[in-house]
Amino acid sequence: MVCVVAIIGIFVAFVKPLAFSIRQGLDLQGGTHVVLEAEDTDIAKVNDDAMNRVVTIMEKRVNALGLTEPIIQREGSRRVIIELPGVKDPDAAIKTIGKTAMLEFKDEEGNTVLTGTDLKDAQAATNQNSGQHVVNLEFSDEGAKKFADLTTKNVGRTIAILLDGEVLTAPNVREPILGGKAEISGQKTLEEAQQLAVVLRSGALPVKVNIIETRTVGPSLGQDSKDKSTFAFAVGIGAVLVFMILFYRLSGFIADVALMAYTVMLLGLLYLLDATLTLPGVAGIILSIGMAVDANVLIFEHFKEEYQIQGKTLRLSMDAGFKRAFTTIFDSNITTIIAAGVLFFLGTGTIRGFAITLGLGTILSMFTAITLSQYMLKLMINSKIAESPSAYGANGYMLWKKEDLKHE
């Protein structure tokens, strides 16, 4: 009774906080899904190194936007998937991450003297004298020398600052600038200046990248998905609990308690692994709950068989039921784990989320069905709280005919 009360208490206290503390995917909280595809050009060809650099730069840009728990991952040889859960301004986010960020400083003859590779830092600020929103640039040591040489040679002339071929500003050089710092003005808002600074800091992309797909999931749609997932999870758990008690009585009750322990352990493990829970992931959890119950059904049916056909005592029938069911449970669960492994290593995105929850759930279901259920059932039989075979469902209806078993 102490074990039962403790597990039920832990389930009631922790299942909801754990479920809502797990990182949620785009389909559960809303946000923006972007697919980028790299393209070969005369200047740069797409290869594995270039794609890895694209992912790194995108991570810098997205993290600089201050978004919570984004997902940036490669898909195939040329694509990058970016998911921005909870993003408030998808258009601005897409514009920022999609910039190629080719910064150039040109003299009046059109010669490019400096590029974004000469930058050390870029920060948004508000000019205290003019009140304009600007981006303050700081050059590297080599870039500072180039900039000093450029401004020295062009006093009284203009220097054009271009981003992706578009002129941002063309200031007139009044005197040489030797400190290795410059200022870009012309941004209408501070947010616009911050976005430009993010792009400049993260650097230019090594290859041309196109946005081939954007999909926005609204917060209301994400909340609706979350509500439906919660409802489906509750219905799945509730239906299993009722089924087990109706068919297997106290044995089913013990299986239900083990199932509660399984649910808490699975959610806790997902939280510790910092997994991202998506709709397919929720489906994997619900499916693994069915797998956990399937193991208990096999055990209890063998339990009935040993009691009704072999005429053994409750304790011996229960021990034999667990031993006979173990091989079947092990084989079926191993095949499920292998399938989950294939999905994880060969799949992408939400498919991998489904594979993780299904695989972890199957492993935990084996543990709870084979060890926890058996341990608590032994304690209950030994305690003699109930000694009637019917209380354990031992003399109940069998899923296969007694005649078939006798013939076998």
Image (cartoon, grey):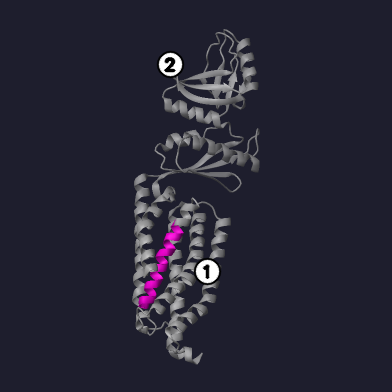
Query: Could you tell me what secondary structure mostly forms the magenta stretch?
Result: helix
Task: Answer with the quarter of the image where residue 237 lies.
Answer: bottom left
Residue 325 left/right relative to 396:
right
Judging depth in this view, the residue of 190 and 297 nearest the camera is 297
What kind of residue is marked 1? Asn
Q: Which mark is residue 128?
A: 2
Q: Position of residue 244 (x, y in %)?
A: 37, 73
Q: Secondary structure at mark 1?
A: helix
Q: Is residue 351 above or below residue 238?
A: above
Task: Answer with the quarter of the image where residue 93 lies.
Answer: top left
Q: Is residue 182 above or below residue 342?
A: above
Judging depth in this view, the residue of 47 and 239 nearest the camera is 239
Residue 346 left/right relative to 27:
right
Q: Is residue 251 above or below residue 82?
A: below
**Does label 2 or label 1 sit earlier along the sequence?**
2
Q: Position of residue 406 (x, y in %)?
A: 48, 91
Give the magenta part as a residue range.
247-267
Q: Which mark is residue 333?
A: 1
The residue drawn where x is 52% and y is 61% is 359
